[in-house]
Each structure stands twice: as C-alpha cells, then as structure tokens.
Image: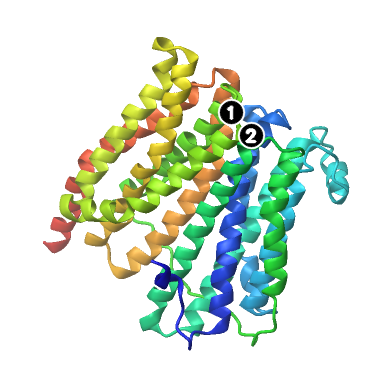
Amino acid sequence: MLAFFKFDNDTDPRIKIAAYLSFISAFGLAGWIAASFSFSVDVLDFSAMNFGFMLSVKELSMIFGFLIPILLGYISESRAQGVLVSLTGTAIILTAFSNTEIVIFEWLYRITGTSNFFVFNLAILAFVLSLCYNYFETSRDSLIRHSTDSQSTAVILGKITAYSVSGTAAGYFVVTVLGFINIPHMYLTVYSLLGIPLIIGGLLGTKKAKPVKSIRENIEVIIRGKFFNFYTLTFFTASLNIIMVYFGIFLLVKVFGLSLGFAALIFLIHSALTFFFRHKAADIMRSKGEDSVMKIRYGITLLLFIAAGFLPVFLNGEAVKYIIAAIVAFYGVSTLFDNSIKSFISYFATQQEQRSNLLIYTRLNKTARILIPVLAGWLWVNYEPYSVFSLGAAFSAICLLISFRIYAAYKDVGASTEQ
C-alpha cells in the first residue's frame, strides 16, 4: 500500500512537490468543509439562505477559469502551485475571523453596502479558497501532462490522486478528533491547524523551477440533441449530491445541534466508504451494465430522499437525527455509480463527442453547484427544512424515469445511424 505513494528515482522533482502539495491542499480543503458547517451555525448563526448563498458564491470560481492560462504564461506551474496553496491556507485561517469586520475586506463592504458582513466574509473566503484550489489542480495537471511521457502519465495521475484522497481523509480525521475535544478557541485552533501547513508547504513549494508555459487543449464543445438525457442526468445528479450531503449535514447541525466532532465524523465515514468501495462499484458497473446500475442508483436515492423528508411525521427528533446522519454517511457509496453516466455515452459517441461531453459534464456539475444551493436555501426559509429533501425526491424521480428509457433512446439513435 505504501509503495504506491513512492515515486521512481528519475521522477521529475516538481511532480514530487506537486504530490505533497496535493496532500496538504486536500487536507486543508476537507477540514475546512467539515468544520464550516458547525462554524456557520455556532458562531455565525447562518440561516439556510445564508448557507446556500455561501455555497453558490464558492462555486462561482468556475467563471474565472480563463485566468489560469494567463497566470501560467508568466510563472511556472511549480511556482503557481506553491502560491495558490499558500493563499488557500491563508483563506482557511481567515475563516476563523468571519464574525468580525476583516480589514482587508473593508473596501468591499463599502462598495457592496453590505450590513451582514459575516455572511459576506465567509462567502468571499469560500470563493477565494475554491478559486485557489481549482487553479492549483489545473496547474498541477498541466505540469504532469508536459513533464511526463504518455506511458507514465496515468501512473503519475494515480499516485497524485492517492495523495489527494489521503489528504482528504486526514483533514476529516483531524477535525473529527478536535471536534470531540473541548479546547478553548475551538474554531481558531481548528482553522489554524488546517491552514498553517498549507502556508508553510506552499512557500516551500515555490522553489525555482524551469519556467514552462502550460499546454492547453482546444476542445470543441459539441452539443447534440441525442445527448439531452446525458445533460439532464448530469445536472440533476450533481444537484442530488449537493442537497443530500451539504444540506443534510446543515440540517443536522442547525436543527438537531450536531456537534463539530460528529459532523466531521459523518464526512470521514462518507469518504472512507467511498474509498473502500470504489473498486467494487467499478466491478458492478462492468458486470451489470451502466443502464442497470443507473436504475438501482436512482431508485435507492429516491427512497432515501422520501425517507429523509417524511421521517419527522412518524418518528421523534432523536431517531430522525440518527437515521438522517446514517443516510448521509452511507450516501457516498451511491455516488460511486455516477461514473456510469460518463461511461455510458462512450458506446454511442464519437471520440470528439466524448471529449466534448466530458467538458460539458464538468460545466453542468459546476452550474448545479451554483444554482441549487440558493434554491434549496430559499425552499428551507419559505417552507420548512425538510422541503429540500422533497426537491431531491423530485430530481431523483426525473433521473429514475430517464434511466428506464436512456438505453432504448441511444439504441434507436445508433440503429438509425447505422442504416
């Protein structure tokens, strides 16, 4: 197991640095996510609308993706990675001060005329954190593509992924342990322990490297009517994951007073199950077929959302809390089958269409992350907390209906094309 994390002696030193930075950046981001649910409720007293707004602003970083090629045109990927990781660590530490008027944001307060500075603070810091992390991944992948030969690229990417997954688990674990310890200045301690390694590691990672511009792939976006089901499943599946995981845990913290330690523990179990069952999920998809897996995935998801939405009618609060916590923790296993959406179209799409649809897949995921949190927050505020699960049930039903007709639809397209 440990051998998988080792690189060959002739591996470019910049890739080794990128691997270590991947670990600490994933560590910081995972810990920040796990801690911010309790922090937003315990310290900032967020409403669901505030929470949804923060999540939506966080994902707006996708709009500024065009800036990374410009950045990499002036500095090397290694230097960019170090700077971005250090900025991520700074944003994590500043999160602990979101309940105060942060001096560096005063000019933004004046421009926007905001009075809810605590909501504004966390939203901006979440945006900066997301922007830096996404750009870090882009610059890292660019470095790997042009500094390794095609035969070893997949192996290197696999090792980098292992570092990221380990960092994520470590972040959740640290917050879980600290959450169960009654220490003074809890959140300042948590965010400092998460952010300081990123600042130090990022600064060390800015060692001089041979400046090389990033390699950009020009992918033509091809939108086809025959892929409408693919687009719909992509958007609504991303929406389901946001509602169940983010608003499920926010419900547990806001309504049931779930502690920091237990909130982080749910994330830890969620990620652990996802890690250990990923190979089994791939085997099931190969043996059962993507269309069958989709039916099972969305059928079970529909039942989970219905259960989460109607449990309070039949059970008392404590029972509801533990059942919803278990649903959210185990929900991660179902997301392993989301790859069936991407792999399914490979049977019916050309190579160019597949490349294009992978780009569209990413864009639709990001779009859902921008739109759905605000919508879910609005439902929560104007109706009741459990109404967000009704929205998830509706989306699950749509996906389930599509999964029953998607194979026939693409089979017809393929048959008409052959004729």
Residue drawn at point x = 42 percent, y = 55 percent: 361
**Quadrant of the rendered image containing residue 122:** top right
- Residue 181 visible? The answer is yes
- Find residue 38 and name its label: 2
Q: Secondary structure at mark 1?
A: helix
- Give how far across and how far down residue 235 sits, in percent: 42, 44
- Name the side, left or right, on which 84 lies relative to 245: right
Against 332, residue 202 (above or below) is below
Q: Secondary structure at mark 2?
A: helix
Q: Assign the N terminus to one quadrant of the image.
A: bottom left
Q: Count how many numbered circles sit on residues in the image.
A: 2
Q: From the viewer's side, name the closer residue of 417 and 148.
A: 148
Question: Which quadrant holds the C terminus?
Answer: bottom left
Q: Residues within 10 Å of mark 2 (few under 14, many from 20)?
A: many
Looking at the picture, does residue 202 appear above or below residue 12?
above
Residue 222 visible in this rendered orientation of the protein = no
Side of 406 where 56 appears, left or right? right
Residue type marked 1: Val
Query: Residue tagged by mark 1?
Result: 253
Q: Residue at x 77, y 41 (%)?
A: 98
